[in-house]
């Protein structure tokens, strides 16, 4: 297994989201038996080396995502997980009933990875954007939902999911070059336990996925304006780390930031937790409003959705003044 030292963290950043997924799957195959299932994206998922070395443990069902989840469930057992992956828009909504039945009702030991989540597939248009699946998947009982923020966390999330027997959905944002957010060798990943990115006292930003890179830049901009920002990496959307979220509510504002529809995702999960608390700061939910942006460059899409570092900082300044 790869060491999460400075060299390993930088290497995974260069590998990109799908390359890191493939590296984690290949490395884990030496330690644990599992099956990998693809819907005609074995190469695109980074599974080529796994498929070459373990052909008896790799299944390509063709462009048939619903079959992909069903086959993965059929191959799995409590001791032997399966990992199934396709583009997020198809691995989630197209497979909604299979996820509901096989992962939710039957608790099959399947890890579904939605690649190209958020706006990562920026040039392919709305049909390939993964901006609403968190709302769907987290509403299904019994499924863990993880949204890792960088290469180190993608690697750690995949390995952690394969080592337990919980049905899991991994929301994989980011493209060919990932931000480096977890820089410390002391970094530890645990499903259901949020990580502190930076401390602060005025504003709490709760984020997930690679968009946390923009949150860190926004915090730097706000620091120049005299506003101290704490950033909480809520990499597990379900189960939500309510202990970390509610441990200190002395901030002037809580801001949730996600590359997802503001309805039903991280912001909604945080709002649900805060709704049961009497005295709390106001929450601002930043994400994709009720629209689908047109295809274009990734940074252009972030600008359309008002999710660049400058726009995040500007919105916080406006709300806090």
Image: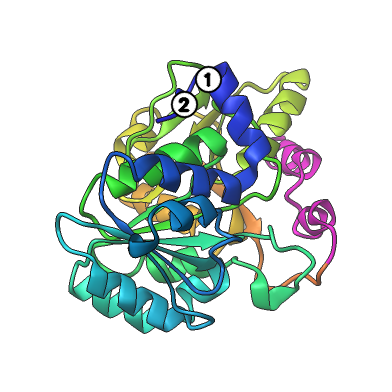
Q: Nearer the viewer, residue 42 or 81?
A: 42
Question: Is there CB contact under 8 Å for labels 1 and 2?
Answer: yes
Q: Secondary structure at mark 1?
A: loop
Horizontally, residue 98 falls left or right of residue 183, namely left
Specify whether 300 is left or right of 15: right
| Span colored in magenta | 296-321
Task: Report helix, strand or loop for mark 2.
Answer: strand
> Quick one: quadrant of the C terminus?
top right
* Residue 281 in view in this figure: no
Residue located 51% across and 49% down the image? 22
Q: What number is the disc on residue 196? A: 2
Whole-number angstrom distance, CA of label 1 to CA of label 2: 7 Å
Closer mark to the observer between disc 1 and disc 2: 2
Q: How many marks?
A: 2
In the displayed structure, would residue 8 be above or below residue 260? above
Where does residue 206 sit, x and y in percent of width and height?
52, 40
In x, y percent, where is residue 160? 32, 41
Disc 1 target residue:
199
Residue drawn at 55 percent across, 58 percent down: 45
């Amino acid at each position: 297994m790869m060491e999460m030292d400075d060299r390993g963290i930088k290497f995974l950043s260069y590998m990109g989201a799908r390359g890191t997924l493939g590296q984690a799957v290949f490395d884990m195959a030496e330690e644990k038996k599992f099956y990998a299932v693809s819907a005609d994206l074995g190469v695109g998922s980074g599974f080529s080396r796994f498929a070459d070395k373990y052909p008896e443990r790799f299944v390509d069902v063709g462009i048939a995502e619903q079959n992909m989840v069903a086959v993965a469930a059929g191959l799995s057992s409590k001791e032997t997980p399966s990992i199934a992956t396709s583009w997020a828009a198809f691995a989630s909504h197209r497979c909604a009933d299979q996820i509901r039945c096989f992962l939710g009702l039957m608790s099959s030991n399947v890890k579904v990875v939605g690649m190209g989540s958020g706006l990562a597939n920026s040039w392919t248009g709305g049909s390939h954007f993964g901006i609403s699946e968190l709302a769907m998947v987290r509403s299904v009982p019994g499924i863990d939902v993880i949204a890792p923020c960088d290469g180190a966390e993608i690697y750690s999330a995949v390995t952690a999911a394969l080592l337990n027997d919980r049905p899991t959905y991994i929301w994989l944002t980011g493209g060919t070059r990932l931000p480096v957010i977890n820089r410390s060798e002391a970094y530890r990943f645990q499903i259901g336990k949020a990580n502190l990115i930076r401390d602060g006292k005025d504003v709490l930003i709760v984020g997930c996925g690679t968009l946390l890179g923009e949150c860190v830049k926004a915090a730097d901009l706000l620091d120049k304006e005299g506003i101290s920002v704490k950033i909480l990496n809520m990499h597990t959307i379900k189960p939500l780390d309510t202990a970390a979220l509610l441990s200190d509510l002395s901030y002037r504002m809580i801001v949730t930031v996600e590359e997802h529809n503001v309805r039903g995702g991280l912001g909604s999960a945080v709002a649900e937790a805060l709704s049961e608390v009497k005295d709390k700061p106001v929450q601002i939910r930043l994400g994709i409003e009720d629209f689908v942006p047109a295809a274009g460059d990734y940074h252009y899409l972030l600008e359309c959705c008002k999710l660049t570092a400058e726009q995040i900082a500007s919105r916080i300044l406006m709300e806090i003044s």
